[in-house]
Image: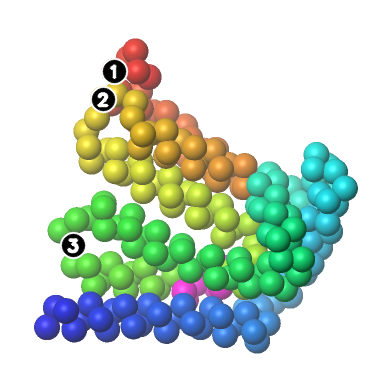
Amino acid sequence: MKKNQFVVSCLIFILFAISIAIGFFNGEAISGAGAKRDFYFTWNYVLALENNIFVDPTTWTIHTPLHYLILFSLNKVFGSQEIVRFAMTIISVVIPILFYLNLKIKFPTFNKNILILLATSIFLYPSYRYSAIWANSHITGLIFFLLSTYQFIKWEKSSSVKINLTIILSSTFLAAAIYTRQYYAFIFFYYLYVFFLKLYTKEF
């Protein structure tokens, strides 16, 4: 019975993931033209990076540049704006998976089927859908942030009082999130506070 429930939960996840691909091919813009317009406008920054990797991004965006450097790198490989956008749409499916892994490690005794369904619900959020379909920096920032929180929770569960690989990975992924969207810097202060409380003074 439990196995059947797990299979059903996974199938629901897959169906919702497919809906994102369908949204891409239909040019879904659930938030209106804003996300679509933002993608095409900031694409000029991606093109500008071809001439100067250190070009000032403020003409096109107020956010830190890592997301656009990733788009630039993908464009160097694929040479197509639409393929780059589709690649980011596919990559965005990682977010509900990472959210599930975060929930699973945070609540190990909780029903896994419910956790899968909670993670699947992300596919219904308009902000997630338009960000995924129009290669918005929200997606890149969230991926790095969820990678960071996964390692952070893993470290907290270990009760380690010394710097180890999980702390290094957590901090590195958070730094990547900050270089994608600068407001993740606020989370860094929380990390520092927890590190201060739990690490040996010398380690901190």
Q: Is residue 136 visible?
A: yes
In the displayed structure, would residue 193 be above or below residue 132?
Answer: above
Q: Which residue is mark 1?
A: 200
- Label 3 residue SS: loop
Q: Where residue 110 is drawn, which disc sits there?
A: 3
Whole-percent x, y for residue 67 in the image? 65, 52
**Could you tell me which residue is drawn at 50 percent across and 41 percent down?**
174
Left or right placement of residue 74 versus residue 56 in this view: left
Say what amino acid the circle numbered 2 marks.
Val
Name, please, the residue furthest toward the top.
Answer: 202
Q: Quadrant of residue 85?
A: bottom right
Q: Are marks 3 and 1 in contact (CB under 8 Å)?
A: no
Q: Main secondary structure of the magenta part?
A: helix
Q: Residue furthest left?
A: 1
Residue 161's label in the rendered image is 2
User: Is tag 3's residue or tag 1's residue first in the polypeptide sequence?
Assistant: 3
Q: Which residues are magenta?
A: 123-130
- 4 vs 74, left or right, is left
Q: Position of residue 183 (x, y in %)?
A: 58, 44
Q: Secondary structure at mark 1?
A: loop
